[in-house]
Structure formats: C-alpha cells, structure tokens
Amino acid sequence: MWSNGTPTSAAPSSPPPTHAFTLHARNAVEMLMTSSPPILEAQGSGLVPDSFDSCFAEYASHTIPVGDLYCNWTWDSILCWPPTKAGDTARQRCPRDKGGVDPSKFTTKRCSVDGRWEGKEAGDYSSPQGWTNYTPCYTPEMLQVIRELYAGSDGEAQTKLNIAERTRVLEIVGLSVSLTAMILSLAIFCHFRTLRNNRTKIHKNLFVAMVIQVVIRLTLYIDQALTRNSKELFSRANHSRQGIDNTAILCEASYVLLEYARTAMFMWMFIEGLYLHNMITVTVFQEKFHYWAYTLMGWGVPIVMTTAWAVTTALYFETTNTKCWWGYSFTHYFWILEGPRLGVIVLNMLFLLNIIRVLVVKLRQSHTSETEKVRKAVRAAVVLLPLLGITNVLNMVDAPLQRSAWQFALWSYGTHFLTSFQGFFIAFIYCFLNGEVRAAVMKSVYVYLSLRRDNLPRRNSAFSSVFVGADAVSVERTRAASTTPAAAAELKPRAWRKCWLKMAPEECKSIPVPIEPDKTSSPETCV
C-alpha cells in the first residue's frame, strides 16, 4: 500500500497506508496468478493445518483408496492441501492471517487427470506443488494494487518491492531522528521561561501531535518487524508471535489513534499558518490571542473527524471480513480525513503566497538590491514549507506503480524522506536555529559554567604559596577596614556577577553598590 503519511513501504502488514506497499501486500502479490482453472467440485477438509509440520502430521499416514488416482497432499507455503482425487479441484477458505485477503472467500487448487497438481497453465507440471489460485481471495483494493504493480514484467515488480523495503529503513531512520529532535525542542520550550510566548505555545502543540504520531508509527514498525522475524523463524512450526496486527481491537485502536494524531498535526499546521498570516498581514488580530479557541480547533475538531471516519470504516470492514481494517486508506471513506487535510494544505499554500507578497512589498520599500530581495523571499518560502505541512502533498498523490522502477524509486525515496524527516526540519529551523532559543541556551550554559568555576576549590601552586601569608594579612586588613556598605560591597564581586547572569533585578537592588562601578555591573544593567 502507498501511504498518505501513514506507515509506508514494505513491512509486515504495515498500518494500512494510502499508497505504500506492505509485507502483507508483498505476500499476497507473491501468491498472485492472473488466471485460474474452472472449479469442478470442491473437496476440502474441515480444520486445515497451518504449517508444514502440522500438514505432514495430518496427512503423512493418509491411505489412498486402491484403484483410485489421487494427487498427494502438499504444502504451498501458505495453506495445506489434502490428497485430492484426479480431475477434481480442491477448495478451502482463504487464509486468515494475510492482509488484503477476505477469509470468507475460497481459494482453489487443481488436480489433473493424471494425478499431478497442475501449474498456472494447463499441462504445466514444473512445480511439484502446482499452482494455487488465490486471486478470488483478494479484496478489490488489493487487486487494484496488484494489477498496477504487475503491469510490467515480474522482474520490474520485484525491483519495486525491494525499493519499498529499503524505503521502510529510510522511514525508520527519519522518524527516529525527528522524534529525538522534537523531544529535545519540547524540553527547551518548556524549560526556559523567556521562550514562553504565543508563538511557542503553538509550536509545542504541533510538536506534541507529531511526537504522538511518530511514536505510534515506530511502535507499529518495530512490532511488525518482530512479527515477521518470528514468522520466518517458526515458518515450519505451528505457532508465531502475537503482535499488534493480529490482535483484535488493539490493531484497530492503534490505527484510529494514528489517524487522530495525523489529523491533529494538520490542524496545528493550519493554526501555525493562520497565526503567522494574521500577525504579518492583519493588524487587528495582533492584540488578541485566543489560545483556548486554537486548542479547541487543534485537538477537538480532529476528534469529531476521526470518530466519524472510524465508525464509517468499522461498518464497512464488518461486511468485508478483512482483518484489522487492512487497506482502509484505499476506500472512499478515507476522504473523511484526507479531504480536510488536503484543504489545510491548500489554505496554508494561500497563506504562504500572501505572506510572500507582503514580504516582497516590504522589501521593495527598502534599499536592498533586487537579488537580495529575491533571495530573502525564496528563503522565507522554503523555511515555511515544512512548518505549514505543504510537503505532505506529495503523499496524497497515487504511487507511480505503473511507471518504471527508477520513477517509482524517485517518488518513494523523495516522498518518504520529506515526510519522515519533517519533524527534524521543523525542530531544526524553528528551535535550534532560532535566535531567542540560542540566546537562552547559551545564557544558561554560561551561568552553569560560571557558577561551577566559582564553586570549584582552588589549588595553590608552589609559586603562589609563597604569597599566601601576605595575601592572608592583606585580607584581614581589608575586612577590618570595610566598615561602610560601600567598602563591604567591594568584597562581593561574585554576588554581582550572579546577579547579572541570572538577570534578577530584585536581588541586585538588595546588594550595596560597589566602589568601582566601571568594573562591575549596576542595578540598571541587571534590569
């Protein structure tokens, strides 16, 4: 599946993205064959074994009636097929543990008249296991992906699947870097009081929404990787690891929370654009900041949208018997969420264009050169692109599955690089490179180092120890002479330095004025 920001690329049953291929999709594609022989009559078993070992234990001692010709039992890596009479077609339920597969439908396998499992084409006996027709098992959404992927050659389709797997690695790296950067940015914004303003309030809410989304994605990715490894490890055993994707309710709840976090992220991006636009272009809004209204819009509206989508999607998948809402982003109901998100991108684009227009007008009134004006306008646009979420529009276009492998690779790597590293870009530009943030951090570091240096015990060298006696006498004489407040203040340079570094005017006023104001700070300096 290909994603509109939901988990993407090749991984076991990845969160049903809007256009990124998952491991379940790949497993299903590997089962795909385009044609099927006619079903003559179903001969199936009741409880079908679900591994090679259990299949062997079930039918190894099976006795074929004398005088009849049968195809032997076989394991096709997905289902176990019982001995089937020559000329018949065995039929059983589709597998339940595959995404994009409807377990209420049936898959078939043809036994030829000479007692051998047939291949895809009549008379094809190249594989002892024959060919299993899983095409009826697929959901309509899955079939559409398969047809587009295999529009070319099988080799090119495999190349695209490999690209999707590598894209997943890129995603995990990008999401991890973004998560680290956003958590660090939140810590900085919350720690320093000088940074607590209206603009950073909106930034913090946006970062929280992005952190929630990234954490859920990484949790699902790690769980899927562990589940896939356990399936490969125990492929011949009759058990596998229990994960999120094969746990009822938990799986659906994870996707609902993921989509809520994504919707909240888009809403806070809209609020970022609205607030910035009003601050720059609309003077009447600069005096008021309705934080409660922004909070209600950023966190409350996504609840209504996500609830409407979740209820509709649950009713739809209840009739299709598809596990864990696999492929939900392919359905028309996904536009309950995707439509408003696209609207946010369009509005933010309009905000950006108007902001650039105002910026260009102001630059024309200055005396800078035309080249400098263009450079500043372009830089402002590039800086605002990730904050306003405009780069997410690439995720809302269909994946070029029918195109060549290099075109698909360009789309896959470029799109998922921008979306996975988006949090890092926003944190880097609006926190780490911000002048106010850097000043606050540097001031805190300077205070810490200064206080640490002052509190460290000083070690006298052999040379300086010669003057210890003289220094002690000098200190005693100075203390005896410091009978006035001004003279006493001369002995407190450390207190004045702490005052200046901490910017605490009340504490400064309580300290007597030093004798030499040109070498120390004054109360006005601290204020």
Image: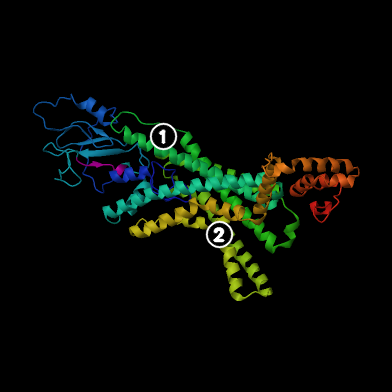
Tell me what residue is drawn at x 34 percent, y 35 percent: 231
Say which residue label 2 marks: 385
Residue 246, disc:
1
Q: Position of residue 489 (x, y in %)?
A: 85, 46
Please rate how many residues cluster around mark 1, counting C-alpha atoms within 10 Å: few if below 14, some from 14 to 19, many from 20. Answer: some
Q: Which colour scheme is used?
A: rainbow
Q: In which quarter of the image is residue 477?
A: top right
Q: Work out whether residue 270 can be spotted.
A: no
**Residue at 21% of width from left, 27% of height from top?**
59
Residue 16 lies, in percent from the top left, at 43, 44
Q: Do the residues labelled 2 and 1 touch (CB within 8 Å)?
A: no
Identify the element where label 1 is drawn. Answer: loop
Find the magenta span and give its range. 130-136
> Could you say where residue 389 lies in the image, as x and y percent from the top left?
55, 55
In front of the other: 340 or 373: 373
* Residue lying furthest front: 466
Q: Residue flagged by tag 2: what amino acid is it? A: Leu
Q: Which residue is drawn at 48% across and 55% down?
A: 418
Mark-to-mark CA distance, 2 and 1: 38 Å
| Nearer to us: label 2 or label 1 | 2
Q: Earlier in the sequence, mark 2 or mark 1?
A: 1
Answer whether residue 135 is magenta in the image: yes
Mark 1 residue type: Asn
Residue occupying the far left of the picture: 67
